[in-house]
Structure formats: structure tokens, C-alpha cells
Amino acid sequence: MKTILITGIGGDIAQGIATIIRESYPNIKLLGSDINSKHAGTLFVDEVFQVVGASSKTYTEQIELLIKTHIIDVVIPTSEQELEVLAPISKELQADCITVGADIVTIGVDKLKTIKCIESFGLPAPWTFLAKDAKPNELPCIFKSQKGSGSKNIFVVKSELEAAFLANKFPDSIFQELLEPADREVTCAVYRTKDGRTAVLQLLRKLTGGLTGWAEVIKNAAVDNMCQQIANDMNLYGSFNIQLRITNAGPRVFEINPRFSSTVLMRHRLGFSDVLWSLDEIMGKIVKFPKVDAGQKMVRIQDVRQLSN
């Protein structure tokens, strides 16, 4: 393995992945791609290429040309839009493409399909339906896009008037049960190996600007059992993130992100190195899961650097 392409290098997930690989494999050539050039990506990889958006008809052609021209061994897509395009054709690419597979991506990028999938496993889930189908009988509740990632553009609807306005303006969004308490939100990193072993890292978190700004490692047996079941029932191979809240009635999953998340560098520092495990399995190595002690805390920091002209 000599060359790796990380897509969406202008974003925090890709930059976290690049940092992990650079520290662990300093001799590997790192390339990045992004739809624009005004970002910090050049600080994390050896070369950055500007490509069209994943929705463009020429996106796959550009990625395939990069793979061929630069003899790329591994492609790591970091956005859900790119995963939707690359996951179905991953076996056709002339490079290993790190994804959880087209089926899981299709479910994970759609918040309504995610809930229906969880319910099909016999697990409890928050009520969820399309805004154009009905009005919520229970307020307050959550209103958010049916597709999309992260914790931005989420509204807490407190009145029928608000619900009617949002449903009329964004009919393809969803209403969802408001899970309480808000301070018991957990992001769970889940990695399942080729031979069916699963590791779960639970991070009790506080969001800052839609990202995990503070996190503490916890160990909740009910959360672990639920994540293990979802990973097994979905036949996961690789890494995804389960978002949930621990309610008085137990854990309730509200989203599954079918990709590495913004906590990827945080959890690597804790020893949950799912990026490296993915590369290890590509190279035929056996993944060994470390023990991660509860109580450890992680925080996100900011940095500012000057780029040369």
C-alpha cells in the first residue's frame, strides 16, 4: 500500500483521517480531493485535486482517472453523498474503497429508512414519519431533513403552528419523537471485522456547532447490546456510527451514520482506531481490539495556520 486518496479533504472528517494515517504510516503518499480549493486540506495531504460534486455525471470518471493516473491503492470516501455514488461501484474501482457497503449506505443516509430498519430488528425506536404524511400528535418533537448528515438544521417544534409551517415549507423532511433527556446523548463508534467480531465505543457527548465538542467514554450494557445487535443484523463489515439517547425507558437510536464520523480522531486517541483497522484488514492483518477505560474525556480544539502564497 503506497498511495491513499481521501475525498472531501476540506472537511474535518477527512482531515482527521489524514492525521491518523500520516502518524501511523508516514511513508504512504496521501492525496485529497474536494469540490473547492479554499480549505486547509493542503496541510494534511501531499497533494489536493479539485473534483466536481458527487451528484455530477462526471464525478466517478474523475475519481477513476485519479486512481489510474496516480496509481491509488485505497480510496476513503468521507461524505455520504460520495458514499452513495461510490459504494455501489466499489468492486469495479481499480482500488480498494473503504465503505460499509451499498445496502447499509442506502439505509443510513435516509433517516426514515434507518428507523424502519431498527424496528424490523425488533428494537424500540422513536416514532418517525414524513412531514407531508401527517401532523405530529405529540409536541415538542424534532423536525429534520430525511437525508443529510451531522446535527445541524434540526428544529425542536413546540407548537402546531410551527409544525404546519415547516411541513408546508419542507414536505420531504421528517417529524421525529423528541428523546429526553438531552444530556444523555451518546455517539457510538461500531466496528465489525471480516470474521464477525464487533467493538463498540460509547461517547457521551456535548455538541458544539453541530459537532462533538466534548465527550466522555461510558459503558452502558444496554447500549452495547443494542449496537452489537444492529451491527450483526445489518451484517456490518467496517465502521459506522450509531447516534442515540439513553431515555428513562432505555437507549433509543435515532440515526446511523454509514461512515467515519467527526469523532474519528478523538476515538483514535483513545485507542479505538477504526481507520487503521480498515487498512489492516485490507492488508490481510488480524484486528485486535484494545481495552478502552470508561471515564476518559476528550475535547475538540481549534487551530489557525497561515498558508504560503
Image (cartoon, helix red, strand yellow):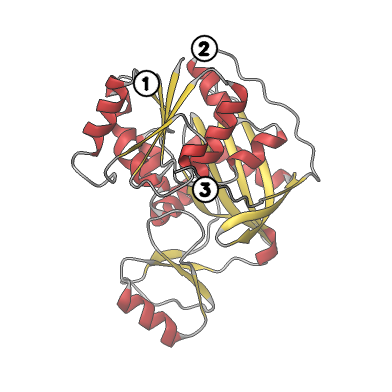
Residue tagged by mark 1? 72
Residue 194 visible in the snapshot = no
Q: State how far apart marks 1 and 3 are (Cα).
A: 42 Å
The amino acid on which the numbered mark 1 sits, given as a three-letter code, is: Ile
Q: In which quarter of the view is residue 164 placed?
A: bottom left
| Direction top: furthest residue | 284
Which of the marked residues, 2 or 3, is nearer the chain's N terminus?
3
Residue 160 in the image: state x and y as whole percent: 44, 85
- Secondary structure under the numbered disc 2 in the rendered image: loop
Label 3 neighbour load within 10 Å: few <14, some 14-19, many 20+: few
The amino acid on which the numbered mark 2 sits, given as a three-letter code, is: Gly
Q: Is the Cβ of the residue at disc 2 closer than 8 Å to that at disc 3?
A: no
The amino acid on which the numbered mark 3 sits, given as a three-letter code, is: Gly
Q: Residue at x 48, y 18 (%)?
A: 282
Asked if residue 197 is positioned above or below residue 6 in the image, the reply reads above
Asked whether, in this view, residue 299 is left or right of residue 147, the answer is: right
Q: Nearer the viewer, residue 8 or 259?
A: 8
Which of the marked residues, 1 or 2, is nearer the chain's N terminus?
1
Q: State how far apart marks 1 and 2 are (Cα).
A: 18 Å
- Specify the label residue 284 is tagged with: 2
Which of the marked residues, 1 or 3, is nearer the chain's N terminus?
1
Q: Nearer the viewer, mark 1 or mark 3?
A: 1
Q: Residue at x 24, y 39 (%)?
A: 59
Residue 171 visible in the snapshot = yes
Asked if residue 255 is positioned above or below residue 31 in the image, the reply reads below
Residue tagged by mark 3? 122
Q: State how far apart marks 2 and 3 are (Cα).
A: 35 Å
Residue 30 in the image: state x and y as whole percent: 46, 27
